[in-house]
Image (cartoon, rainbow, N blue to C red):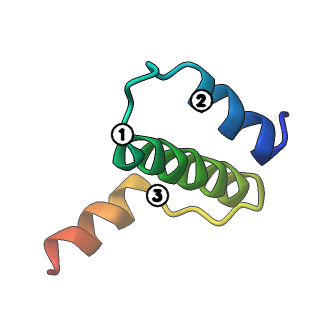
Amino acid sequence: MNTLKQEALKAIAQLPDATDIDTIMYDLYVIDKVRKGRESVEKGETISAADLKREIESW
Protein backbone atom coordinates (compact mmCIF):
# COMPACT_ATOMS: atom_id res chain seq x y z
CA MET A 1 0.00 0.00 0.00
CA ASN A 2 1.22 3.49 -0.81
CA THR A 3 1.92 5.97 1.92
CA LEU A 4 -0.58 8.74 2.51
CA LYS A 5 1.84 11.23 1.01
CA GLN A 6 2.26 9.11 -2.14
CA GLU A 7 -1.51 8.81 -2.55
CA ALA A 8 -1.98 12.55 -2.05
CA LEU A 9 0.72 13.44 -4.56
CA LYS A 10 -0.70 10.99 -7.12
CA ALA A 11 -4.22 12.38 -6.70
CA ILE A 12 -3.02 15.97 -7.06
CA ALA A 13 -0.87 15.12 -10.08
CA GLN A 14 -3.92 13.70 -11.87
CA LEU A 15 -5.93 16.90 -11.48
CA PRO A 16 -6.01 19.54 -14.21
CA ASP A 17 -3.57 22.44 -13.81
CA ALA A 18 -6.46 24.89 -13.35
CA THR A 19 -7.86 23.00 -10.33
CA ASP A 20 -8.89 25.15 -7.39
CA ILE A 21 -7.86 24.57 -3.77
CA ASP A 22 -11.35 23.38 -2.79
CA THR A 23 -11.14 20.50 -5.27
CA ILE A 24 -7.68 19.54 -4.05
CA MET A 25 -8.82 19.63 -0.42
CA TYR A 26 -11.92 17.57 -1.23
CA ASP A 27 -9.83 14.91 -2.99
CA LEU A 28 -7.48 14.72 0.00
CA TYR A 29 -10.48 14.47 2.34
CA VAL A 30 -11.87 11.54 0.34
CA ILE A 31 -8.49 9.78 0.34
CA ASP A 32 -8.32 10.18 4.13
CA LYS A 33 -11.84 8.80 4.67
CA VAL A 34 -11.24 5.80 2.39
CA ARG A 35 -7.94 4.98 4.15
CA LYS A 36 -9.60 5.21 7.57
CA GLY A 37 -12.46 3.02 6.38
CA ARG A 38 -10.06 0.37 5.10
CA GLU A 39 -8.16 0.46 8.40
CA SER A 40 -11.42 -0.04 10.31
CA VAL A 41 -12.30 -3.05 8.17
CA GLU A 42 -8.86 -4.56 8.72
CA LYS A 43 -9.32 -4.11 12.49
CA GLY A 44 -12.76 -5.71 12.36
CA GLU A 45 -14.45 -2.49 13.42
CA THR A 46 -17.53 -2.94 11.27
CA ILE A 47 -21.23 -3.51 11.73
CA SER A 48 -23.60 -5.62 9.67
CA ALA A 49 -25.86 -4.12 7.03
CA ALA A 50 -28.89 -5.10 9.13
CA ASP A 51 -27.49 -3.26 12.17
CA LEU A 52 -26.77 -0.20 10.06
CA LYS A 53 -30.29 -0.26 8.65
CA ARG A 54 -31.77 -0.44 12.17
CA GLU A 55 -29.54 2.41 13.28
CA ILE A 56 -30.64 4.61 10.38
CA GLU A 57 -34.30 3.78 10.88
CA SER A 58 -34.11 4.72 14.55
CA TRP A 59 -33.21 8.32 13.72
Q: Please, what secondary structure does the residue beneath circle 1 have?
A: loop
In the rendered structure, are the residues bearing label 3 and label 1 in contact, judged by CB atoms less than 8 Å apart? no
Give the left or right position of residue 21, taking residue 6 as reference.
left
In space, the residues marked 1 and 2 are separated at their CA atoms by 14 Å
Marks 1 and 2, the one that precedes in the sequence: 2
Nearer to the camera, 57 or 24: 24
Q: Quadrant of the C terminus?
A: bottom left
Q: Which residue is mark 1?
A: 20
Q: Please, what secondary structure does the residue beneath circle 3 have?
A: loop
Q: Is residue 3 above or below residue 12?
A: below
Nearer to the camera, 29 or 55: 29
The percent position of residue 29, horizontal first and vertical second, equals 49, 53
The percent position of residue 10, horizontal first and vertical second, equals 68, 26
Q: Which residue is mark 2?
A: 11
Residue closest to the far front: 18
Q: What number is the disc on residue 30?
A: none
Q: Amino acid at mark 3?
A: Ser
The residue that appears at 35% across and 49% down in the rendered structure is 22
Q: Amino acid at mark 1?
A: Asp
Q: Please, what secondary structure does the residue beneath circle 2 have?
A: helix
The label nearer to you, 3 versus 2, is 2
Q: Amino acid at mark 2?
A: Ala
Q: Quadrant of the N terminus?
A: top right
Q: Is residue 24 above or below residue 37?
A: above
The residue that appears at 78% across and 44% down in the rendered structure is 5
Q: What number is the disc on residue 48?
A: 3
